[in-house]
Amino acid sequence: QVQLVESGGGLVQAGGSLRLSCAASGRPSSLSAMAWFRQAPGKEREFVARISWRSGLTAYADSAKGRFSISRDNAKITGYLQMNSLKPEDTAVYFCAGAVNPSRYDYWGQGTQVTVSS
């Protein structure tokens, strides 16, 4: 089992920045990748970014490219999502997800609220 705990959400003005963190515990060595998803009110959960835990290879949703950056700290077993140039449409609950099998996400955090005011 792996436990994921997000932190770093909050209220920020449009154009501002936030850095989300996702701390992994339990058996984090079983993870092959970590990703961030988000869910806005009344909308489905959507993919934001993903990073391979071993290689560091990254992938982004079009909405995140050029503004968001995903990274990980192997020593701290923590993933990060640096979000810059935030827009009101980025307002959502952001979830961290961990994948053992590259084709699916096995573990999820509880989510952290990000609110961007205009």
Image (cartoon, rainbow, N blue to C red):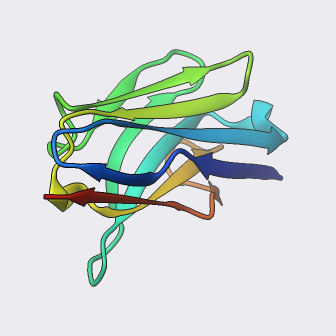
Name the residue located 21 percent from the left edge and 59 percent from the top edge. Answer: 117
Query: Residue 77, located in which quarter of the rendered image?
Result: top right
Residue nearest the viewer, comparing 42 with 57: 42
Residue 9 location, x and y as percent? 47, 51
Q: Is residue 96 above or below residue 19?
A: below
Q: Is residue 17 above or below residue 56?
A: below
Residue 38 location, x and y as percent? 37, 60
Residue 39 location, x and y as percent? 36, 68
Residue 64 location, x and y as percent? 22, 40
Q: Is residue 40 above or below residue 29?
A: below
Quadrant where the C terminus is found in the figure: bottom left
> In this rendering, would 107 be left or right of 12?
right
Q: How many marks?
A: 0
> In this rendering, would 98 be left or right of 85?
right
Residue nearest the viewer, comparing 80 with 37: 80
Residue nearest the viewer, comparing 21 with 118: 118
